Image: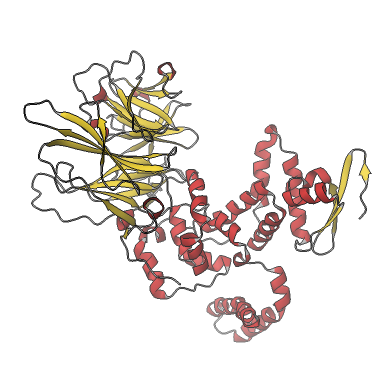
Amino acid sequence: MASSTTGEKKILTLKGGDNEEFILEESLVLQSELLKNMVKEERVSSIPLPSIKSKTLVKIIEYLKKHAELTPSNKEEFKNFEKEFVNVVLEELLDITVAVNYLKINGLLEFCCQAVADRIKDKSVEAVRKIFRIESDFTPEEESEFRKETPEAFEGDLDDTTN
Amino acid sequence: MEAKNVTKLFDVPITVSNSILSNFKNQKQKIVKKYVFVKSDCDCKRRRAYEITIMDLPRSIMVEILSRLPIKPIFRAKSVCKRWYNLITSDPLFVPMYQTRSLNFPCILLSVDCFNAAILELKAGYEYYSRPRNRPVMLIPKFNLPPLKPKIGGLFYEPKLEIIGSCNGFICLMDSDKYDENHSLYISNPLLGEYLKLKLPAYEKRVRSVAYAFCFSEGCGQYKVLRSVVRKFRGRPEVSELEVYTLGVDEKWRNAGKAPYPLCGSFRGSVNVNGALHWLDDENTKKSASIYSFNIRTEEVKPVPAPPGLETPSFCLRIVELGNCLCLSDNNYFQHVDVWWMREYGIAESWTKDRILMDSIPPDIPQTNFLPIIIWKDGEILMQSERATQLISYNPMEKKFRMVNVYDNGTAATRYIPSFYSLKTVMGENFHVSNVYPKTDIV
């Protein structure tokens, strides 16, 4: 819990929702606007993040590490890592998105939003509802109105394979 | 609160039981067991704490997500649920966010036939080159274009819908022929189905010809419609002038002074670069071409230097905009097409030439004039062969052409940037904007 310094590197403890602790270099969390402010202004060494599941936190820390190691030479590798990073079940992706939004890690937030959008993009309305567990609150008349206005949007190369 | 959770709770078990029902008709016992198991597992508290759904995302994130969708998926997303519908149609964050994102989805606007225009979304990563598998990715906004008025006694002119121009998602269209005294101009946002009919100056007998252009100036944030008019007064030479109508500002068309004569034919292919509208001269007898510009903010007409030494008459040239650069495509030769780029705006010496050899054109592409439309797919130039419906893509690195199979009956393509801004943002909140479809009232 207490802050310690090894050489020049400052160490910080993050505490996830399940009280699991993660000890990491302070420089790593500076990518998060929220944590950066807490570290710089309030000089804390342990930050409780009760709203973020440990599992989610592990993923995010993993990303921060990879992102910190990003150089022009391993760009491709990082891209592949990003692809794998969001290749998770929907709930997990949403968990990460909410946490990243809370932590204000802007680049990753954009990437997560794109990943969610990609899951909506090529699917039919019914498939989107099913995958995202959304109940339609439109009347059948309203629904048929939408289809009448833009029939092209409801036809064509839709891919309803769930993920 | 409690009731909500209960309904949510039952979502899953019911779907499970249904799917199982269809598979194992006679095993009802099993279904009940499964049902009970799932239900008891879904303790309200745990579920709320652990299973986040997309409906739990804050508004700003949801807008972030929805604004990343291309056009067709936006229309589908709108009909998923009321919350998404409201975010897309009335959240103040959505429209500006979509505008910044929409550059990621290159689109072109096509005249499909005399009556219809279409928006074509070019999907990133989509294989357009290989043949039969790819269906056109076409969004036909004919549903949203202004209804055409019936043609009265039109023996000479085919009724048609011509695209005058496209700026930030607004398009300017002309129905029937400009020589027809009853022609009308429309400004429309085809994605919203909104349009308005522009009031044109009263018909004058002495008007010999008219032509229109549509432009936008970032500097003053104004959309202007230009009209080039040639009038003939008895006993005097013809007079060529420009008239301007600023959307949301002007009550009437204003005279903007003399214009180089004649320019009617070439005014059509005018392009918007660097806050000015550009067009080529319209003289068929001159050996070399002149380029003119109309500063959209100051309304000043000025010549722009053409490539030094270029000796191609203007009817063999096409003026285009590629990646914010003023360009000319020179179709004067049999063996090659030259694409000229004005790398630094206004600097004659900055014109550079890319020579495209006709040998690199596959034999099945008709070798007519080539008109570049946009830069897409890692710097490839999407072009249209004039008078043909074929799109082709040119890769300047490989110096190779490829056929692009996206549509089969479009002509005259222009760049289009999708936007959900209402015409009211330009015309004023109180302006009456017509809508192709009566607005669906969704509360």
Q: Nearer the viewer, residue A23 or B215?
A: B215
Front position in the image: B431 or A42: B431
Q: Which residue is at 67% across, 59% downward?
A: A98
* Left or right of B186 on screen, residue B231: left
Location of the N terminus of chain B (image quadrant)? bottom right
Q: Position of residue A93 (x, y in %)?
A: 65, 58
- Please identify the residue farthest to the left as the structure is shown: B235
B323 w.r.t. B166: above or below: above
**Above or below for A84 versus B89:** above
In screen coordinates, is A59 left or right of B66?
A: right
Labels in figure, total? 0
Of A161 and B424, the residue lying toward us: B424
Q: Is residue B352 above or below residue B253?
A: above
Residue B204 lies in what quarter of the image? top left
Question: Farthest top residue?
Answer: B309
**Residue B402 in view of the camera:** no
The residue that appears at 65% across and 51% down in the rendered structure is A109
Image coordinates of residue A67 in percent, x first then y, are: 72, 42
Q: Position of residue B305 (x, y in %)?
A: 36, 19
**Between residues B243 and B263, which one lies in front from this camera angle?**
B243
x%, y% of residue B397? 48, 26
Does any portion of residue B349 appear in the rendered image?
Answer: yes
**Colouring method of the image:** secondary structure
